Image (cartoon, rainbow, N blue to C red):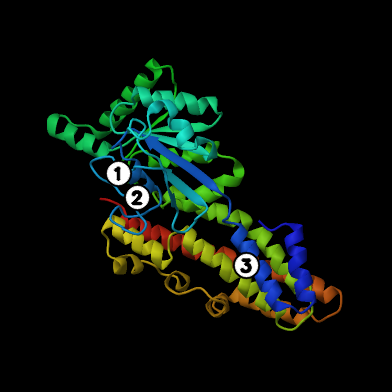
Amino acid sequence: MADSSDIVGIKEALQNNNQALAAAKIKELLDNQSNTPLKIGITGESGSGKSSFVNAFRGVDHRDEKEAAPVGVVETTAEVKEYPHPDYPNVILWDLPGISSTKFPADDYLSRVGFEKFDFFIIISDTHFRENDVKLAKEIQKMGKKFYFVRSKVDNDLLNAQRRQRDFDPEQTLSHIRDDCKQGLLNAGLQAQVFVLSNFYPQRYDFHRLHETLERELPEHQRDVLLVAMPNISLEIIEKKKEAFKSKIPYWALVSAAGALVPVPGLSVAVDLSLIAGLVQQYKTGFGLDTPSLQRLANTTGVQLTDLTSVIRSPLGLNNINAQLIMKTITQIATVASLMAAKEGLRFIPIFGTMIAGTLSYAVTYKALLDFLEMLTEDAQNVFKKVLPA
């Protein structure tokens, strides 16, 4: 978020007619918004689905040789391995070896994997939570850190229950699995929530409940970075991303207003376009509308990339974001275009003209970002509906 020192630095660069420095400061300001670190430890018994969870959380296809954590029917994690988010490298999921593996015996598991560096932990089991899981949770608790139990592979449980039961009820089966896991933990002296999910169908089951819980319990500075890094597993997630982006628009409009106070021809427009282009690119990435994200989505869902792009309506969603595209799109929004023209004329009237220009610059950036955010939100919703399982 922009603070007063950021705005002053940009304004001073503009006053010195140093467009390159002003642009660099704006880029630095934009980059800093996604640099909050978030380190998540993923652990549990061997073969419980840890690596698959790491992939699902990052929206990466399990078959992606470059990005995916390796998965298999036997323990595939032999050592501590970090997997940065493909779009937000400051968000790192650490795939930890199975707690009962011979290389990491339970007694010294915590110290050997360096548990102190993680912000919170996901403990995964594909059956009941075992003694080692409980022991691990209690140690994490002693460290004053959060942990969350995930019961994985429930798609397999539902399929087996459907084959066995005459009056099959999926919700009742899921409720039974949750309650059974909670009771087992309670018997071992732990009261904790349990999230049931499938790593292959993140839009179903409890993935959204897990996110809501993390969002509620994480420190404020980490909530937004978790939110934008999450795949679009529900329309609610998309709406939350929109509101998070929207809440910061007033601060970015202040940066634009600072540029308008410097009466140098062309500088204010250059600042506005540079700032808006950078933010729109952040919106696209956060909504998963950039080409690499759409390709990963196509890989994980089996929906063709061309089918995904066919439901993207806005020019911002379909084209590379640059100042020229932003200017072209702004001219198609009558209110924003007229405000921008008025602002440029007023900037060269001494004192009062520049003050009014600053106010108009704020309005231009605010309105443009709001309209562009609405466009991209609609695109993200359309893409989600295209891949939503029947």
Identify the residue position indicated by label 2 in the image: 69
Q: Is 350 drawn above or below residue 305 in the view shown?
A: below
Q: Nearer the viewer, mark 3 or mark 1?
A: 1
Mark 1: which amino acid?
Thr
Residue 5's spot in the image, x, y percent? 76, 59
Q: Nearer the viewer, mark 1 or mark 2?
A: 1
- For residue 359, say whether it is visible: no
- Quarter of the picture containing the N terminus is bottom right
Q: Given contact means CB atoms under 8 Å apart, are the residues at marks 1 and 2 in contact?
A: yes
Residue 223's spot in the image, x, y percent? 55, 45
Residue 348's spot in the image, x, y percent? 80, 81
Identify the residue position indicated by label 3 in the image: 27
Q: Secondary structure at mark 1?
A: loop
Separation of marks 1 and 2 at Cα, in angstroms:
9 Å
| Residue extending farthest right | 351
Relative to 247, is 92 on the left or the right? left
| Residue extending farthest front | 103
Mark 2: which amino acid?
Ala
Identify the residue position indicated by label 1 in the image: 76
Residue located 47% across and 74% down the image: 320
Quick one: label 3, few (<14), some, or many (20+) residues within 10 Å? Answer: some
Residue located 73% across and 68% down the image: 10
Q: Given contact means CB atoms under 8 Å apart, are the residues at marks 3 and 1 in contact?
A: no
Q: Is 100 drawn above or below residue 215 in the view shown?
A: above
Quick one: label 1, few (<14), some, or many (20+) residues within 10 Å? Answer: some
Q: Secondary structure at mark 2?
A: loop
Quarter where residue 275 is shown: bottom right
Which mark sits nearer the N-terminus, 1 or 2? 2
Residue 337's spot in the image, x, y percent? 62, 77
Q: Given contact means CB atoms under 8 Å apart, are the residues at marks 2 and 3 in contact?
A: no
Which mark sits nearer the N-terminus, 3 or 1? 3
